[in-house]
């Protein structure tokens, strides 16, 4: 019995309904995927973005909180950039703070974890990039993962 995550239309609705995003495992290192996603979310969305990392104090000029429990808001969506062995603890924190969506980035997939999250009332999205999904539904996706700003079928 496999796990079926939200459909494309469901994911689009999740993004429409989301006002605040907590990025767990956000990094100040520009070479990290979380930094690239954070830069996109801050520049191309209306989301209120909060960074969670116990080992940082500032990322992209914004404050960082050591845990979800210490955020000044309850985030709608928790976007996770952590190792697979850390996901259970992040799920527990997500449930405890009352977020509605638990979103795991590319490469993160655990059916038992998804079922546990859903049983706790969360919407769970796995193995999908929040930046890619947002760009996909808002017309800004390019093969390289960013908006070139060029609308043409002709190669340069």
Image: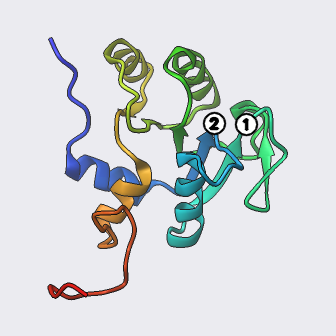
Which is more toward the observer, 39 or 4?
39
- Give x and y (percent) for residue 136: 29, 62
Image-quadrant location for residue 117: top left
Mark 2 Cα-neighbour bin, 10 Å: few <14, some 14–19, many ≥20: many
The quadrant of the picture occupied by the N terminus is top left
Number of numbered discs visible in the structure rendering: 2
- Asked whether the beta carbons under mark 1 and mark 2 sit within 8 Å of each other, the answer is yes
Q: Residue at x 40, y 67 (%)?
A: 146
Q: Residue at x 58, y 24 (%)?
A: 90
- Say whether residue 121 is left or right of residue 78: left
Q: Which of pointers 1 and 2 lies earlier in the amino acid sequence?
A: 2
- Say whether residue 92 is left or right of residue 117: right
Instruction: For mark 1, give the secondary structure.
Output: loop
Q: Which mark is residue 142?
A: none
* Residue that mark 1 sits on: 53
- Say whether residue 11 is left or right of residue 62: left
Q: Residue at x 62, y 59 (%)?
A: 48
């Amino acid at each position: 019995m496999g796990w079926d995550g939200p459909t494309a239309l469901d994911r689009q609705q999740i993004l429409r309904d989301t006002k605040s995003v907590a990025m767990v495992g956000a990094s100040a290192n520009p070479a990290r995927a979380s930094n690239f996603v954070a830069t996109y979310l801050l520049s191309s969305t209306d989301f209120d973005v909060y960074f969670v990392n116990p080992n940082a104090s500032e990322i992209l000029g914004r404050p960082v909180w050591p845990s979800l429990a210490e955020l000044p808001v309850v985030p709608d969506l928790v976007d996770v950039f952590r190792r697979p062995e850390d996901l259970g603890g992040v799920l527990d924190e997500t449930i405890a703070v009352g977020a509605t969506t638990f979103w795991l980035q590319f490469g993160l997939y655990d059916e038992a974890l998804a079922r546990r999250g859903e049983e706790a009332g969360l919407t769970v999205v796995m193995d999908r990039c929040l930046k890619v999904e947002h760009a996909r539904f808002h017309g800004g996706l390019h093969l390289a993962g960013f908006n070139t700003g060029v609308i043409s079928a002709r190669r340069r």
